Image (cartoon, grey):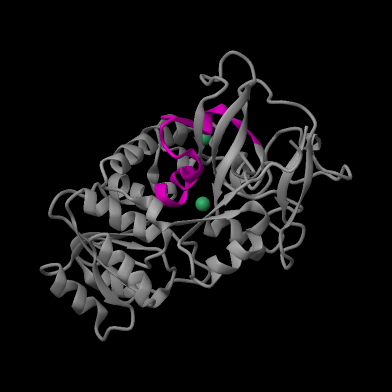
Amino acid sequence: MRFGAAVLRSYEKPFTVEEVVLDTGPAEGEVLVRIAGCGMCRTDLAVRRSAGRSPLPAVLGHEGAGVVVETGGAHTGLSEGDHVVLSFDSCGHCRNCLAAAPAHCDSFASLNLFGGRGENAARFTDAAGEELAPRWFGQSSFAEYAVVPARNAVRTDPSLPVELLGPLGCGFLTGAGAVLNSFGVGPGDTLVVLGAGAVGLAAVMAAGACGAVTVAVDRHPERLALAERFGAIPLPAAAADLPGSVRRLTDGGAQYALDTTACARLINDALRALRPTGHLGLVARLRTALPLEPGALDRGRRISHICEGDAVPRLLIPRLTSLWRAGRFPFDELIRTYPLTDINEAERDCEAGLVVKPVLLPEPMHH
Ligand SMILES: [Zn+2]
Ligand SMILES: [Zn+2]
């Protein structure tokens, strides 16, 4: 079948929206999904800085959601017409998958990021027959259609706005999962969130839903205003004595801190803002060494990396849609939609901080 997709052909050049070809339908255990909308995540844009590790040409996009149009075999657990949110891929049989930690799957990097999928790549090509990289995050959803392993397709209620649900599969899942799973935040707990982007604001919303007290730190006043609207206490990143300010606002120090900035200065500030036994989680990829000040981890403080909010997508995504229905996780207010053909404008707006979460809506080119 032929359909429209946004292809990245060079780390430096814009996306091109063009026709691509899928040679066969879904294999056993896969489903073909008509994409209703796909969020743009920092990890898509980071491909440009991957220095050759992420193969091109590629169809990116890993926050897809849509409708199942064909199932591969009788054992996918899904049916034609089901609404699904697509999340990250995992193997299902390594130690961490068996331990319900699929975000730490032994094959996470190769399955999702670096084109190491053991599949027949030749079936996915451009219109001229050139092979495209194996499916990004098992989906490649900046497209009208995606073939995905049924394992990472999460069925959702058809009354939900499916075109907006894709970011629940990665960005919003990461922020909310850090709060609900990795930290296990409870009522009256204290949290500081560094960086009020899509991940940070999802954390703010989830912490609010848990009855926690949250301080949000950002450079941009409009992002702080958003965080405040969702219940956080705003604190400018340039404030003098940031750790002292957080300690004052949290009765002696935050129990939890979530860093989405990968900025070494802010990470050290976050550690100094923690109370004894406090936990700092890092979600952004560090690009430099991280020097820690002497004593930063004293008195039981700890630091860990958090991937995909330690989520089992089939458990966390339904929790998030339930919270949304209850008015306690209004993620849709962070979204601006663009036609897929405007993907380069969406990227520019995202890099310029003009939009928290772009969602691209494919418009059929050939039907
Ligand atoms: Zn695994
Ligand atoms: Zn992502």
In the rendered view, would you say 32 is above or below 340?
A: above
Q: Who's the residue at 76% across and 33% down the image?
A: 120
Q: Within the magenta stretch, is there residue 165? A: yes
Q: Position of residue 64 (x, y in %)?
A: 55, 42
Q: Is residue 254 left or right of residue 329?
A: left
Q: Magenta segment, which residues?
A: 146-173
Q: Who's the residue at 44% across and 40% down the image?
A: 161
Is residue 282 visible to us here?
no
Q: Position of residue 144 (x, y in %)?
A: 66, 41
Q: Between residue 135 and residue 90, name the one nearer to us.
A: 135
Residue furthest bottom as drawn: 240
Residue furthest front as drawn: 367
Q: Between residue 107 and residue 112, name the one nearer to us.
A: 112
Q: Within the magenta stretch, is there residue 153? A: yes
Q: Is residue 272 left or right of residue 89?
A: left
Residue 34, by quadrant, is: top right
Q: Who's the residue at 49% across and 70% down the image?
A: 354
Q: Who's the residue at 15% across and 67% down the image?
A: 250
